[in-house]
Amino acid sequence: MKFRINLFFPLILIFLVSLGCNNNNSGGGTDADGLPSNPNDWVCQDSVINLSQREIDTWCSENMDRGEPAPPAFRTPPPLADLTMKNMFDEQFRGFIRNRRYTTELDWNRDLNWRMTGPYLGKIGFGEFFGVHSSAVRIYYSPEVVEWLCGGRQGEIPDGAMIVKEQHPINETLGIITDEQGCMEIPLNVDPTSWTTYIKNKGASFDGWYQGNVRAESTQNPEPLWQIGNPPILNASAITSPDFFAETGNPPFERDPNWYPTGYLFLNDEQIQGDNKNPDVVWAYNQYGNWCINCHASATSESTFSTLVNIITPGTQFIQFSPDLALLFNTNFEGDIHIPQRVALEFLESENPDGIYSTFYGSTAKSDRGISKFLRSNPSRRF
């Protein structure tokens, strides 16, 4: 459609900018108030699919070849108490994950495509994401997990089963496309930049999972020891470099900003003094009963949200909110406009039953009182 600008443009522009529609790399210009209050409105309703038992049975019968189980060396992770063996396991397992052997060698079933796990506010790569793990995901399932899913999620997942969640930052390299409702889709087959992993070992913890996190290998060669993160972790101080105390022989006794914030190594130069962040870590990235249980405890069974819906269908789609303001300056634009400030426009329409002029909708404005009232009553409201 033809995108037209008329006298109402300055008012709309001021309105959008005043509501905090800024595009910056920090993503700090928006907050949760920019989303509809009802989470159901974050979801593209047509994408919510409940598979029938017949559809499940058909897929399961037609996909009996579900790949090979994980190698024996990776089926029983050692506990944190056996730190030496745990470090050896974790470093070997990291290589298994980074090389993506679960797909290149074992041929596991996976989600049909990369997918978003929540709505996005603003321009992709410059806004704020309200999904899980702050990333797009694509999950691979060992054959034991798929068998359990085909069995209706009944009983227990056997020990040694594995779930591997590939993750990628929300940015322009995903090639995210949207339809006229703002429903987001990821059409590209991109490489993961990190992974969240689950290995089943029922007797090792209350939830029975060894949960871990692996980052893609650093582009620096050789990879700086401190950037590897953990594994390994060494001694009671949970340091990650054997020469950590090389200069003093002991932990520091005075404040050292290069220790902060403890628990995370991957900081840029603006967050620390120079590039001298010390490799100090306060928890193991991989362990039984890890922080993942904070969310996964709410799963209906086996502390996992795994579902055949994501394997058989594209999965639930979420909405991108907020337009690309650059389009407002292009008077010759033809084609699909970016996603409208849906929440703001719904408010304006409710205040103006006779209709308003919108550069997004193209109807005729009868009054601008709705905008004025909204700005007066919501001076700090940001979308």
Image: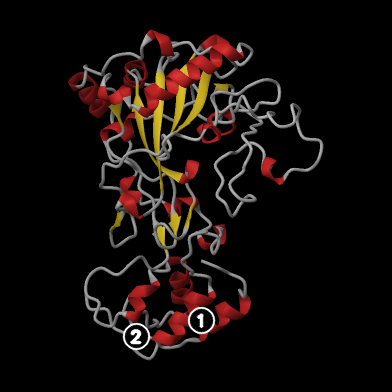
Q: Nearer the viewer, residue 326 or 179?
A: 326
Residue at (38%, 22%) from the top-left corner? 96
Residue at (51%, 54%) from the top-left corner? 38
- The picture places residue 42, in percent across and down from the top left corner, at 44, 53
- The picture places residue 226, in percent across and down from the top left corner, at 56, 34
In this view, the residue farthest toward the right is 253
In this view, the residue farthest toward the bottom is 7
Q: Residues within 10 Å of mark 2 (few under 14, many from 20)?
A: few
Q: Is residue 81 above or below residue 197?
A: above
- The picture places residue 299, in percent across and down from the top left corner, at 50, 29
Res. 229 image quadrant:
top right
Spatial CA distance of label 2 from label 1 is 14 Å
Q: As shown in the figure, which amino acid type bears the numbered disc 2?
A: Thr
Q: What coloring was used for the rendering?
A: secondary structure
User: Which circle marks residue 143 in the picture?
Assistant: none
Q: Nearer the viewer, residue 202 or 361?
A: 202
CB-based contact (under 8 Å), mark 2 and mark 1: no
Q: Which residue is mark 1?
A: 370
Q: Is residue 93 above or below residue 13?
A: above
Q: As shown in the figure, which amino acid type bears the numbered disc 1?
A: Gly
Whether residue 18 can be seen here = yes
Residue at (51%, 81%) from the top-left corner? 371
Q: Looking at the image, is mark 2 or mark 1 earlier in the sequence?
A: 2
Helix, strand, or loop for circle 2? Answer: loop
In this view, the residue farthest toward the left is 62
Res. 377 image quadrant:
bottom right
Q: Which residue is mark 2?
A: 364
* In the displayed structure image, the side of residue 292 where residue 126 appears, left or right: left
* In the displayed structure image, the side of residue 138 where residue 304 appears, left or right: right
Q: Is residue 311 above or below residue 187?
A: above
